[in-house]
Amino acid sequence: MSARTLRSLQLGLAVAGGVLFAVLVRAIGVAAITTALERLGAGFLVVVLFELVTDGCNTRGWQCTLAPGTPIGFWRLYWIRQAGTAINLLTPTASLGGEVVKGMLLRGTAGAADVVASLVVSKLSLVIAQATVVLLGIGLAVRRLHDAPQLALAIVAGFAVLVAALAAVVVVQRRGWVGGIGAAFARVAPRARLALALRDRGAALDHRLEHLWRERPGALVASVAWHTVGQLVGLVQLWFILGALGVGASFATCLAIEAASLVIDSAMFVVPGRVGVQEGGRVLIFSAFGLGAATGLAVAIVVRLNQLAVSATGLAAFAYFSWSSTPLADSISGS
């Protein structure tokens, strides 16, 4: 890919993200946004701060999976991750476009296979951390859904599918089957670029993944641990939001809400930005828990506004990285 094409792609993604950002604000409605912010007040800044801390934990989890000696500091990696997260949230790329952006922004820092391996394993670590939170809270959620057995069954089934998918991904990574899967896809769809890339570069990626799983198990454990800490910070964030909105809820209730929400969000990952799904899911869960649809919508709006605020910083970082020859982290210091 030429530098001009890469620059055009980056510009296109930034514009698309900015457009969807505006669409989301319009879809939520200025009046609803104003009402939620008035109820939360200055507490909204605390909500954003919680999110930034969560992102910091997730960045450290990603950093654990990079090859030893990779010349990149925490803060540069942090803003690269923010840029990728913004693209994932604001563009219709099924949470994959942001991973491509992260890879592009790390070009020249590490080998392509090392970068892709770190992204793959870090994403897996994040999903394992989310599955851990669901495992801790699913029993609490089901007990609170005794009047909504269909929803309880759907959440349990969704969790079972999530665990099965996790197991399949772990097997593929540990057995070194990425290249083989790419070759199989290439035979079925010989003109598909993704299949050809997996076939041609799969062996190198398999080697990096094998090295991570067999030679650096401590890095994998540390990555999952950091991502899990990030999820726990998110639980505290939800508890704070409910308190600020005047809803008294125990930490156990927050855990149950988060577990159910994660299952629904995971099932709808292909929806760009989970527009509508995220809001509808919160309304459904809060209603089933007896906390009221209005509370669910208010929380959903606060969560969406928080995502938009953090995505704005990610888009700014993406624009900076795309058009500046000086890494963002050089101005705010290293590791």
Image (tube, rainbow, N blue to C red):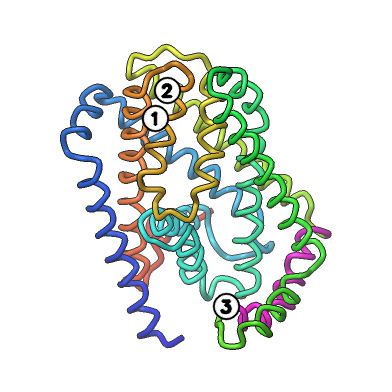
Residue sitting at the far top:
248
Determine contact: label 1, label 2, CB under 8 Å. yes
Instruction: Please check the rendered image and state whether residue 25 is part of the magenta-colored stretch, yes or no.
Output: no
Which amino acid lies under the numbered mark 3 shown in the image of this protein? Answer: Leu
**Looking at the image, is 51 positioned above or below residue 92?**
above
Judged from the image, the secondary structure of the residue bearing numbered disc 2 is helix
Residue topped by disc 3: 194
Judged from the image, the secondary structure of the residue bearing numbered disc 1 is helix
* Observer able to see residue 302: yes
Q: Residues within 10 Å of mark 1 (few under 14, many from 20)?
A: many
Residue topped by disc 2: 287
Q: Which residues are magenta?
A: 195-214
**Looking at the image, is 96 positioned above or below residue 260?**
below
Which amino acid lies under the numbered mark 2 shown in the image of this protein? Answer: Ser
- Image side of residue 264 versus residue 227, left or right: left
The quadrant in which residue 329 appears is: bottom left
* Observer able to see residue 333: no
